[in-house]
Amino acid sequence: MPGSPDSTADTAPAGGERGTPTDGQADEQVAEPASAGRHRAASGEQEAEELVEQRRGRLHPAVARTREAVRAGLVELPRGTVVLVACSGGADSLALAAATAFEAPKLGLRAGAVIVDHGLQADSAHVAAAAADQCRSLGLDPVQVRPVEVGTEGGPEGAARRARYDALRDAADEFGADVILLAHTRDDQAETVLLGLARGSGARSLAGMASAAGLLRRPLLDVPRSTAAAACIASGLRPWHDPHNDDPTYKRVRVRHEVLPVLEEALGPGVTEALARTAGLLRADADALDVLAADLAETAVRRAEDEVVCDIGMLEVEPTAIRTRALRQAALEAGCKATDLTAGHIAAVDLLITDWRGQRWIDLPQGVRAVRRDGSIVLAPGLT
């Protein structure tokens, strides 16, 4: 502490009073002409100017990376398309907003932003307004804050996600937007894969998030989170840090701060990249299997009044990966919600085909039941 006995703040250097050079130093300074000091100062200024000149016009690598990713995600859109950035005010979404604001006009696109205020924190309205101001400063237009009410169905994360996507779709309808950009990064993809793995999900869940799905596009899905954060700072933006991102109550936070670091330490660097790459490979496989399953369902699955009927003879000769996908499609058509229908449910229904032992029925979400009857699997609510 200043003024304390062990403080060096007021202690004179050895060899003389504070600020007084030793004898040898004094002789050296006296011998130096004043012109030499001016020469050194001028030389330093020149070096500084040369350094500035070298860096002038040089794009920060992180900014270049995010712009390149956004350009690749937008380049095929027709001129005049309205694009909205979903911006939370965090580093990832502000980096996305900055890159979109730069690239969209070059491609003849109109780019705006939507900030969803979940109202889950006392200062959420202030955070949303600050994010909107930064989006406007980038030149995005329109920019809108949309407050939402978050329910309870599906847990806090699921309810907030549902409210957010509903608000984004409503904004797209209002502004005539054909594309909504989301700021999920490669790290988010890796976390999603690990969460799916922990649930024991199938290939579709392990395939992570799609780079494009309907209105939604994720141009930063191959960009590391650290790169997006660096691009945000290099662009002169002020990101907001969501305290929920440090709350271990959420599974994703535990994966981010506890699981992935342990994997990186035990297996070496590159685990996050490898998980994201695996997701891409699994997505390609899952897409191909879904096409084959849809073709099978065209002939093996039919609707008869309020029931969905699956032909056992057609299904049992197909590979498990295709058959179970067709059964999942049938369950969804019978009224099950995709978010509630698990791989375990479908495996149980599949046993009615592959290991029939007189089971009465299989209970599925939303009150749907699956029963084996007259060479078919029948799915409908309340079957007996």
Image (cartoon, rainbow, N blue to C red):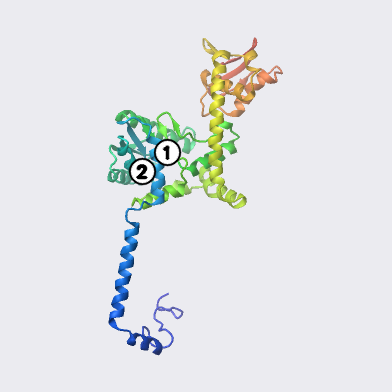
Q: Which one is in front, 31 or 267?
A: 31
Residue drawn 56% across the image and 30% down it? 285
Quadrant of the rendered image containing residue 75: top left
Q: Residues within 10 Å of mark 1 (few under 14, many from 20)?
A: many
In the rendering, at what x and y percent does residue 227 appear? 44, 49
In the rendering, at what x and y percent does residue 338 appear? 51, 26
In the rendering, at what x and y percent does residue 52 appear? 32, 60
Tell me the quarter of the image containing the N terminus: bottom left
Instruction: Give the alpha-carbon distance from disc 2 to disc 1, as whole Å.
Output: 10 Å
Q: Residues within 10 Å of mark 2 (few under 14, many from 20)?
A: many
Q: Label 1 amino acid? A: Pro
**Location of mark 2 (residue):** 99
Q: Label 2 amino acid? A: Ala
Quadrant of the rendered image containing residue 277: top right
Q: Is residue 25 above or below residue 132?
A: below
Residues at circles 2 and 1 in contact by the CB criterion of under 8 Å: yes
Q: Secondary structure at mark 2?
A: helix
Residue 127 visible here: yes
**Location of mark 1 (residue):** 219
Q: Secondary structure at mark 1?
A: loop
Q: Is residue 279 above or below residue 334?
A: below
